[in-house]
Image (tube, rainbow, N blue to C red):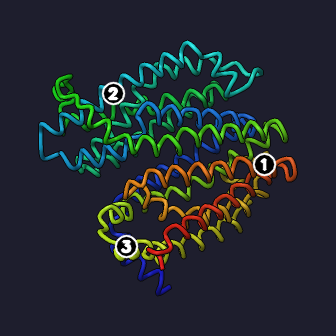
Amino acid sequence: MKLIKKILQTNLFKITSLNSLSVLIRIGIGLVTSKLLAVFIGPSGMALVGNFRNFVGSFETISTLGSQIGIVKYVAESKEDETELKKYVSTIFITILGVSFFLGGMLFFLADYWNELIFGVNFKYSFVFKTFAFALPWYALSLVLVAIINGLGKFKKVIYITIIGNAIGLIVSILFVSQLKTLGALLSIILTPSLLFLVSFYFIAKELSIVTSVRWRFFDFKIIKNLSHYFLMALVSGIIGSIVYIAIRKNIIANVGLQEAGYWESITRISSYYLLFVSTILTIYFFPKLVSSKNNQETKKVFWSYYKNILPLIIVALIVIFFARFFIIKLLFTSAFLSVTSLFFWQLIGDFFKTAALILGFQFLAKKMTSAFIVSEIASLAVFYFLSIFLVPLFGIQGVVMAQAFDNIIYFLILLIYFRKILF
């Protein structure tokens, strides 16, 4: 109790408390959405939704050039210089719009190809890809606007946008999933972020006039060059990562079945809810400290602050989740998903090592260690893919969570060795 009280009194929790409401609302809405999907589309539909979500994620990364972190950084640095700020805003907007329209064309005219690639020949959802083609520019711009608002230091507005966006997402999901089942679930994935553009534009209009700020004469190619480091890193985790996950899910469908692939999507959803707390704390509190660390000694303090204050709480939370797994499945899904309870052990083992490695991985982003990040991410994705290919035929759906756990353990050990001089 003394340890918990001590942690709760630290500056870390005082800072992250501002974001706690947003996180709780997001998780709450996520839980309701999971129940909605479970009731109306079942495990098989969940697998299709998982594949499409990964596909959308990869296009999101390409359309924004994976540069949200970079946008926050450079807007924050130039917000006091009006001319410099206009350069960044103009360059980012013009580039993102150009890329989004090009990708939109690819989505629209190759809709049948994407449908077969993502869903297979037995499903006809080409209409979804054509809808995504029109939604993508708004989708990309909404993410850019949020990054700009964040860079301007308007943290509360970012929280408001997130809360409103999640509320919109819930309403859209209820309407579309209840009426259109799987098709509605797929459409809600792409329509919600597009509607978020209107919310983001409303909030940024009070801080910056986008209409007057975006001009061709302010376009500066050097800014694109500066953001390229972030794109290269996002390329690996966002695009290659999505491709690997889609390939693994298709392998599960081929070897075990569509329903079992839905079980994996379900356990992944549950995992994402509690990992959201960890990623939020890392982004809000630890990442800025890693960025500002001037030497190995200061970085070491940040690393061990995370391991001493956050990791013990994560261990307790994971143990509670394991023993409450039957209750969790009944609460979030339906009796058709009870087989998911058998996946918790290996999923939680993997998530522990994932959270242990996250703080070390953030050092790559903080210090723009592009090459090291790319090599480590590709190696990790390769290990996960090949282990899943080997283990799924042997252990069924258990094989994929085992593969993910082993991959996270190996990744953590590699980062531990890489940063050993800082840590020890």
Q: Residues within 10 Å of mark 1 (few under 14, many from 20)?
A: few
Front residue (pair 420, 195): 420
Residue that protrudes farthest toward the right in the picture: 394
> As shown in the figure, which amino acid type bears the numbered disc 2?
Thr
Identify the residue under disc 3. 296
Q: CA distance from mark 1 to mark 3?
A: 51 Å
Q: Position of residue 377 (x, y in %)?
A: 56, 51
Residue reaching furthest to the bottom: 2
Number of marks: 3
Say above or below: 184 vs 35.
above
Disc 3 residue type (three-letter): Asn
Q: Nearer the viewer, residue 39 or 385?
A: 385
Please, is residue 387 above or below residue 131 in the view?
Answer: below
Q: Residues within 10 Å of mark 3 (few under 14, many from 20)?
A: few
Residue at image location 44% in from the left, 72% down from the top: 303
Q: Secondary structure at mark 2?
A: helix
Kind of residue at badge 1: Ser
| Element assignment for label 3 | helix
Task: State how far apart marks 3 and 2 are (Cα).
Answer: 37 Å
- Mark 1 = which residue? 335
Of labels 3 and 2, earlier in sequence is 2
Quickly name the residue at label 2: 95
- Residue 3, visible in the rendered structure: yes
